[in-house]
Amino acid sequence: MLASYPERFFEDWNVGDSFVTADANVSREECLEFARRYDPQPFHLDDDAADSSVFRGLAASGWLTSAVTMRLVVESGVMRGSGILGTGVDELRWLAPVYPGDNLHVEAKSWNLRPIPAARVLAACVCV
């Protein structure tokens, strides 16, 4: 699996282009620290509360998985220098819980390119 890509700008993308990042392990300590600071829901902080939740165990915050996703994409270098990552997110869903010890990677595929004068947009489906 490739972890590092050459720099690409908007003009370098085509519909259907894809990339896969390296893996990142989500540790229990990372889950707890993030939850304490940013998402203090009981199922992110307490094993007993998590065991009786819909997750049936301590689950990472979805916002942590989003932050890990951003880190993996940035570290891959695929969009280095283009600023394209800062243009926004139109839709975000957490389809499955992430648990301490899980390994994550990003698989993304572009499905639309819109050259808008003020902000060129690369629409991609990103799966973690």
Image (cartoon, rainbow, N blue to C red):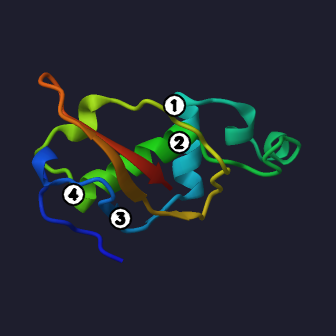
Residue with the mark numbered 2:
33
Of the numbered discs in the image, which one, if any, rests on residue 21?
3
Q: Residue at x 26, y 51 (%)?
A: 74
Could you tell me the amino acid type at mark 1? Answer: Arg
Classed neighbour count for the residue bearing mark 3: other residues with Cα under 10 Å, few (<14), some (14–19), many (≥20): many
Foreground disc of the pair 1, 3: 3
What distance separates the C-alpha of mark 4 from that of mark 2? 29 Å
Q: Is residue 96 above or below residue 23?
A: above
The part of the image, by quadrant, that contains residue 6 is bottom left
* 11 horizontally vs 107: left or right: left
In front here: 46 or 16? Answer: 16
Residue with the mark numbered 4:
78
Q: Is residue 10 above or below residue 4?
A: above
Q: Earlier in the sequence, mark 1 or mark 4?
A: 1
Foreground disc of the pair 1, 4: 4
Q: Is residue 118 above or below residue 52?
A: above
Q: Earlier in the sequence, mark 4 or mark 3?
A: 3
Where's residue 43, x and y in %?
74, 39
Residue with the mark numbered 1:
37
Of the numbered discs in the image, which one, if any, rests on residue 100?
none
